[in-house]
Image (cartoon, rainbow, N blue to C red):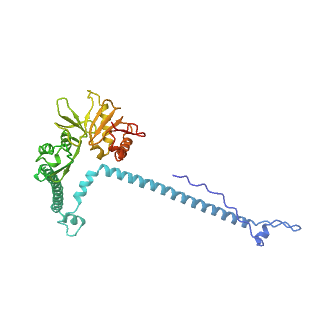
């Protein structure tokens, strides 16, 4: 508890106002005036009584204020202590309080006055349980419906995929038909029957599973085929495009007959007699030596098509001594395979001139200085 305040000293009386009788009696003596008169004893006693009374009043007021402040502080502390004690008691005695509260709760069925407990009892446990069961049943039904839709979609997708696979791979609708083949580019040496035999092996196979690359390799292995391309033609056909190796010369063979070679020197066919439109190339054949043959074939390739058909035979001892004979015309001394394009142009001009009919030999080994002579 706070200590009471100490009594204060009595207040000093206010100075009298100017002009009042009191001021006239208590003021300083004016210059030249007589000394002021002294207070009477009765007036002094009355002033002292009033001062003491004012001091006692101040002391009483201060004491009351201090007591009130102390009581307020003590009351607040007591209230706080009471609340803390109540919370502790509630925590300790919560089970007992719950049972006591349940014991003193009025029975809604017997109470004549409607109470909040009656409203709660109106919705009985059976009603709540029934509603919950209905909600759970609805949720199970919705979940079952969702699963059925989901698995139905999956089954439809799986069946569609299976049907597409069966249709493309196993259905006769997309089975290859060997009668529906379009082939071109056989040339003069490629046998169409052999190409049909290679393709007929795959008759009835699904067009999607057909090994087109394998068919191309089998066709390229045939005589006279340089390159082959096989394309699918849906729903059941094929398109075969062949690049043939056309023979440009016939080379005599030791055992008789002739070997037909293309412009790369590769044998493409054989014949007992040389074809009328091919020149016969007579050169020494050495195992592993193809420079003379390559030179001769290069000269033939540079000749214009009309002039090439007039070449009857080509002879060469070396790659720099090539000469050939024209059908119904003179012999041509060609020399090496260098400047073959220029030599072909000069030879064409000379053959169209009047001197060519009288010449037996035309020498274009030096194309800038050609020579014609008669034997």
- Which residue is painted at 76% across and 67% down in the image? 40
Task: Name above or below for residue 65 compared with residue 195.
Answer: below
- Which residue is painted at 19% across and 29% down in the image? 254
326 and 116: which is toward the camera: 326
286 and 25: which is toward the camera: 286
- Total marks shown come to 0
Determine which quarter of the picture holds residue 47. Answer: bottom right
The spot of residue 269 in percent (x, y) is 19, 38
Quadrant of the snapshot with the C terminus:
top left
Determine which quarter of the picture holds residue 261. Answer: top left
Q: Furthest residue to the top?
A: 287
Q: Furthest residue to the right?
A: 32
As drawn, is 313 to the left or to the right of 21? left
- Which residue is painted at 28% across and 51% down in the image? 94
The spot of residue 49 in percent (x, y) is 66, 64
Determine which quarter of the picture holds residue 6. Answer: bottom right
195 and 79: which is toward the camera: 195
The spot of residue 349 in percent (x, y) is 37, 46
Task: Name above or below for residue 9 compared with residue 208.
Answer: below
As drawn, is 26 to the left or to the right of 222? right
The spot of residue 246 in percent (x, y) is 24, 42
335 and 155: which is toward the camera: 335
As drawn, is 140 to the left or to the right of 264? left
């Amino acid at each position: 508890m706070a200590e009471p305040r100490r009594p204060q000293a009595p207040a000093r009386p206010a100075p009298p106002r100017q002009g009042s009788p009191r001021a006239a009696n208590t003021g300083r003596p004016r210059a030249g005036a007589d000394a002021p008169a002294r207070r009477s004893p009765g007036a002094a006693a009355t002033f002292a009584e009033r001062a003491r009374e004012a001091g006692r009043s101040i002391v009483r007021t201060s004491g009351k204020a201090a007591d009130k402040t102390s009581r307020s502080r003590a009351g607040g502390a007591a209230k706080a202590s009471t609340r803390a004690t109540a919370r502790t008691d509630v925590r300790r005695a919560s089970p007992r309080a719950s049972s006591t509260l349940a014991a003193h709760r009025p029975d809604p069925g017997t109470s004549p006055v409607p109470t909040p407990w009656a409203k709660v009892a109106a919705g009985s446990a059976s009603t709540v349980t029934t509603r919950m069961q209905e909600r759970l049943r609805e949720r199970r039904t919705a979940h079952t419906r969702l699963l059925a839709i989901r698995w139905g979609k999956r089954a439809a997708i799986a069946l569609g995929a299976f049907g597409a696979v069966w249709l493309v791979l196993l259905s006769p609708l997309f089975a290859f038909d060997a009668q529906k083949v379009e082939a071109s580019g056989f040339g003069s040496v490629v046998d169409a029957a052999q190409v049909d035999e290679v393709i007929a092996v795959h008759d009835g196979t699904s067009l999607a599973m057909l090994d087109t690359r394998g068919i191309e390799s089998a066709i390229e292995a045939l005589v006279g085929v340089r390159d082959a391309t096989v394309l699918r033609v849906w729903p059941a056909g094929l398109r075969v495009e062949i690049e043939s190796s056309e023979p440009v010369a016939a080379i005599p063979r030791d055992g008789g007959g002739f070997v037909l070679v293309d412009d790369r020197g590769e044998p493409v066919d054989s014949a007992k007699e040389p074809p009328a439109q091919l020149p016969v190339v007579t050169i020494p054949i050495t195992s592993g030596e193809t420079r003379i043959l390559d030179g001769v074939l290069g000269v033939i390739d540079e000749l214009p098509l009309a002039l090439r058909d007039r070449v009857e035979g080509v002879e060469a001892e070396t790659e720099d001594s090539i000469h050939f004979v024209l059908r119904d015309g003179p012999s041509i001394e060609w020399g090496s395979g260098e400047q073959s394009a220029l030599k072909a142009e000069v030879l064409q001009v000379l053959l169209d001139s009047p001197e060519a009919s009288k010449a037996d030999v035309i020498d274009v080994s030096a194309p800038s200085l050609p020579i014609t002579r008669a034997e």
